Image: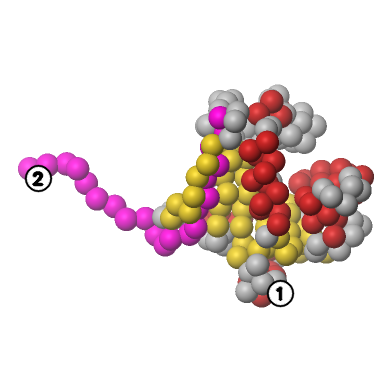
């Protein structure tokens, strides 16, 4: 039984939209696409290789799948582990609008909530989610994420789609580890740890 892990790029104010370029997702008039690119460094590259080394399969939203499918098949260097994993491993695409998916080892998932347990049972290590902002909201609403890898970049945008938006279930997380890259990106990994606990610092009347 695999874990469902989510690796997400975030600004300091929680924006996940279009980190890699203006054309990724300009919806809602978002004009800050490509905000991650100036912060890419060796520490981030090394971490992402470590993540992809653990992958047995991917669960992707429609937009991220289409972005990946237009890019990664053109990366044919066998020493590029990320490209090799994405091009070779199973890719499950959560979509109710796509009629077909042609990238090697791709298949459609129309009811992702009911499909996740069955998909996890197929693989021994990790079923990984990358990007996929819309899919992430569905997974959060149904408490389906086992581990998070959050890469928080030193930039504030003020607008854009956020990971933990309205609708996410209240949850308590356990910190698994942190590191900081050369450009100031903070990478934090968390595991699901039940529901939040509450208290009060107020003095009794």
- Report the magenta residues as a range: 184-205
What element does badge 1 sit on?
A: helix
Name the quarter where the N terminus is drawn: bottom right
13 horizontally vs 37: left or right:
left
Name the quarter where the C terminus is drawn: top left
197 horizontally vs 187: left or right:
left
195 horizontally vs 20: left or right:
left
The disc placed on residue 122 is: 1
Mark 2 and mark 1 residues within 8 Å of each other at the beta carbon:
no
Q: Is residue 198 magenta?
A: yes
Q: Position of residue 159 (x, y in %)?
A: 59, 28
Q: Position of residue 188 (x, y in %)?
A: 52, 45
The disc placed on residue 204 is: 2
> Can residue 83 be seen here?
no
The disc placed on residue 138 is: none
Circle 2 or circle 1, nearest the eye: 1
Q: Nearer the viewer, residue 8 or 25?
A: 8
Q: Nearer the viewer, residue 164 or 127?
A: 127
Q: Residues within 10 Å of mark 2 (few under 14, many from 20)?
A: few
Q: Position of residue 200 (x, y in %)?
A: 22, 46
Q: Residue at x 60, y 65 (%)?
A: 3
Q: Position of residue 40 (x, y in %)?
A: 69, 32
Q: Nearer the viewer, residue 196 or 71?
A: 71
Q: Residue at x 55, y 61 (%)?
A: 146
Q: Earlier in the sequence, mark 2 or mark 1?
A: 1
Q: Tell which residue pokes out farthest to the left in this image.
A: 205
Residues under labels 2 and 1: Cα distance?
53 Å
Q: Residue at x 66, y 53 (%)?
A: 51
Q: From the viewer's perspective, is residue 38 above or below residue 203?
A: above
Helix, strand or loop: magenta stretch = loop
> Can residue 103 be seen here?
yes
Q: Residue at x 49, y 50 (%)?
A: 177
């Amino acid at each position: 039984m695999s874990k469902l892990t989510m690796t997400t790029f975030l600004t300091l104010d929680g924006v996940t939209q279009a980190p890699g370029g203006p054309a990724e997702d300009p919806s809602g008039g978002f004009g800050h696409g490509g905000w991650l690119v100036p912060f890419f460094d060796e520490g981030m590259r090394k971490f992402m290789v470590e993540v992809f080394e653990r992958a047995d399969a991917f669960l992707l939203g429609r937009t991220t799948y289409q972005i990946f499918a237009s890019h990664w098949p053109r990366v044919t260097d066998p020493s590029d582990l990320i490209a090799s994993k994405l091009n070779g491993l199973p890719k499950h695409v959560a979509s109710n609008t796509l009629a077909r998916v042609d990238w090697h080892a791709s298949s459609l998932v129309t009811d992702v909530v009911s499909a996740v347990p069955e998909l996890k049972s197929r693989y021994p290590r990790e079923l990984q989610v990358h990007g996929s902002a819309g899919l992430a909201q569905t997974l959060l609403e149904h408490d389906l994420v086992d581990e998070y890898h959050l890469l928080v970049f030193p930039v504030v945008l003020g607008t854009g789609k956020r990971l933990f938006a309205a609708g996410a279930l209240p949850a308590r997380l356990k910190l698994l580890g942190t590191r900081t890259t050369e450009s100031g990106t903070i990478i934090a990994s968390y595991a699901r740890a039940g529901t939040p606990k509450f208290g009060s610092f107020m003095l009794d009347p």
